[in-house]
Each structure stands twice: as C-alpha cells, then as structure tokens.
C-alpha cells in the first residue's frame, strides 16, 4: 500500500495542476474532494478537427463516474471545457474553441458518492495541444483549396504554406476585387490565399507588372495621402483610400472610403488598410502583379464593404482601429 501511495504522490507532483489548484478548481465548481483519489486518466491523443473543435481520446479509469476536460490558462487558472458524465466512451469532441490558441488540456476523473454531494477527484494528466489544424486539400477548377475535418473551406491558409511562400497579386478591375495566390510547387500559383475589395479607375490598364518600391507613408495627388503604398508601375500604385493629412491615420476621407468596391480612382488601386499592409508585409519587390478584367469575382467571391459614418475618420481595418472603435462603441469587424 505504501508503494501505491508513493506512486500516486509522484504523479501528482509531476502534474501541471498542483493539489492546491485541484482544490481551487473543485471549489470553483461547488465540488468537495475526499481524501481518496481515483486512478489517473490519460490523454492518448488529440486530433484537431476544425477551427473550433478537436477530438480527444483518453484511457478510461475503472470506477469513474465521468471526467472533467479542462484547460490551464496562461495565468494558471482553470477553465472547464467539457464534462463527460459517464464512463462508456473513450473519445469525444470538444467544440467552441478559439482558432490559433494553444490549449493545455488537463483531464480529471470523478466519482459520485451515494448519499452526499461529494465526489472523488483523480490526479490529473495534461497535454499541450500545439498540433497544426488537420486539413485536407482538394483541387477544384484548377485551384487548390483547404478544408477542415468538418468540411468547411478555410479562407486563411497561410499556416499551411511553406515558411517563405511566394505570392502573386491579381486585380480584377471589372469586379473590383484583388486576390492573392500562393505558389503550389511546380503547378504554379494555384492556392487562393486572400481576397480584398479594391477601387481601380478608368486609367488602370491591364497587364503583367512587377511590384516596385514600398512606402510607409506617401503623398498622392490633390493634397491627399496614403499609408503602406507600393508602386505597380509608373505613377500607378497600391494605396489606401485617401487621407487629408500626411501621416495622420485619423484624417480618412470617409466619402472616398465608402466607394471601395467600385471604380473610383484616377488609375491607382485603392484598398483598405488591411489589404495594403498585407502587401507591404508579405510581398517583396518584384512580386508579380496581374491586372485584368473578368466578370468572375474570383475563388472567394467579392467581399462586402461595411460603410462607415462621416465622423468615422479612420479605416476600421487599420491596425490602430481596435482601440478607436472600442472608445467610440463601434462594432466593426476588426481584422
């Protein structure tokens, strides 16, 4: 018996959750622990099924009434993700998760005691979930798409590309959509990555070009200014919708911003901040830019623009938008 107790004690020492945390967890959920301890359940495997769910397989504990599946947060607090109220299965799906968050899974077995509200809680087993999202790729109409295990197509596929992916930028001036494609090995640029609304103009000519010099801030024409500007060719640029003050991202020309998705420029390709900054950060000089006309919007269709009121003097997709929108009570989608 002494050896058994020593082994259980060592397991509890090695566990991420200390005995104090275990009691805190129990108290948080109105659970009182007894001195007796169940055997330790074990997480055998975790398969990430989709952007919001994963499949967990465990080693069951004889005599357990069920299990608490928990996450240990960065601050040491414990969040219960799921309660399994039986001991008949060794695998289950946990949903409602946040994409790209790392979960530190912990499993506790419990046993109900007859005639009281007390339960016996086991020592714990933990597993850090750092695996990539499990996906499958399918070729459709010449393009490569990624799907999660729930059959949903992923629109953000950068996590499944090489460490230094190569991109091509295609601008459809008829539908006012810009789409980024990544190179799929020898197949060419067949992986759709992102689509953004744009506003070209009647002097935006079709053709194949190479991305030129990039500027954090740039003076445009007619006393207007831009952020994260990149040269396409000559005086034709990728740039934000105009600002009325140089270097001041709280001076957005709201009227011009609300024209996004329609032809509105003098020849340049206007974009939201999120789009031009994406080019600025991810596309080096000489990245190929193809400007063309087509009735087909592209593999992701045409994004919708959420128009903003006159007083909203900043682009809601700007990197600084979150604090500004929170201050003014905006409910925009912040990228």
Image: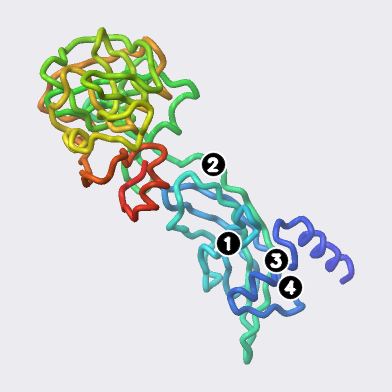
- How far apart are the alpha carbons under marks 2 and 3? 26 Å
Give the mark nearest the N terminus, 3 or 1. 3
| Label 1, residues with CA under 10 Å away: few <14, some 14-19, many ≥20 | many
| Label 3, residues with CA under 10 Å away: few <14, some 14-19, many ≥20 | some
Residue position for label 3: 21
Give the mark nearest the N terminus, 1 or 2. 1
SS type, badge 4: loop
Give the percent coordinates (x, y) of residue 14.
77, 55
The quadrant of the picture occupied by the N terminus is bottom right
- How far apart are the alpha carbons under marks 4 and 1? 18 Å
- Measuring 19% from the left and 33% from the top, which residue is drawn there? 256
Left/right placement of residue 114 relative to residue 327 reads right
| Label 4, residues with CA under 10 Å away: few <14, some 14-19, many ≥20 | some
Q: Are marks 4 and 3 in contact (CB under 8 Å)?
A: no
Give the mark nearest the N terminus, 4 or 2. 4
SS type, badge 3: helix
- How far apart are the alpha carbons under marks 1 and 2? 18 Å
Residue 70 got which mark? 1
Q: Nearer the viewer, mark 2 or mark 3?
A: 3
Residue position for label 4: 37
- How far apart are the alpha carbons under marks 4 and 2? 31 Å
Left/right placement of residue 102 relative to residue 53 reads right
Give the mark nearest the N terminus, 4 or 1. 4
Q: Which of marks 4 and 2 is in front?
A: 2
């Amino acid at each position: 018996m002494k050896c058994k107790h020593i082994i259980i004690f060592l397991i509890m020492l090695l566990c991420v959750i200390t005995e104090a945390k275990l009691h805190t967890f129990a108290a948080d959920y109105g659970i009182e622990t007894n001195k007796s301890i169940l055997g330790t359940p074990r997480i055998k495997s975790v398969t990430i099924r989709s952007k919001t769910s994963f499949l967990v397989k465990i080693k069951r504990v004889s005599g357990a009434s069920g299990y608490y599946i928990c996450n240990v947060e960065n601050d040491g607090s414990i969040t219960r993700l799921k309660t399994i109220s039986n001991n008949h299965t060794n695998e289950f799906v946990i949903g409602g998760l946040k994409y790209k968050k790392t979960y530190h899974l912990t499993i506790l077995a419990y046993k109900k005691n007859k005639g009281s509200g007390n339960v016996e809680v086991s020592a714990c087993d933990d597993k850090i979930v750092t695996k990539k999202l499990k996906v499958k790729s399918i070729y459709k109409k010449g393009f490569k798409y990624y799907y999660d295990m729930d059959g949903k197509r992923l629109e953000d596929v950068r996590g499944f590309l090489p460490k230094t992916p190569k991109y091509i930028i295609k601008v459809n001036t008829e539908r006012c959509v810009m789409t980024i494609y990544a190179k799929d090995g020898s197949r060419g640029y067949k992986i759709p990555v992102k689509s953004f609304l744009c506003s070209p103009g009647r002097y935006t000519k079709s053709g194949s070009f190479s991305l030129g010099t990039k500027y954090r801030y740039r003076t445009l024409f007619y006393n207007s200014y831009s952020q994260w500007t990149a040269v396409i060719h000559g005086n034709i640029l990728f740039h934000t919708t105009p600002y009325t003050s140089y270097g001041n991202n709280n001076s957005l020309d709201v009227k011009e911003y609300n024209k996004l998705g329609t032809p509105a420029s003098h020849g340049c390709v206007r974009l939201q901040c999120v789009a031009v900054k994406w080019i600025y950060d991810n596309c080096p000089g000489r990245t190929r830019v193809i400007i063309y006309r087509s009735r087909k919007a592209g593999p992701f269709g045409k994004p919708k623009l959420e128009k903003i009121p006159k007083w909203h003097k900043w682009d809601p997709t700007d990197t600084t938008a979150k604090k500004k929108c929170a201050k003014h009570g905006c409910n925009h989608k912040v990228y």
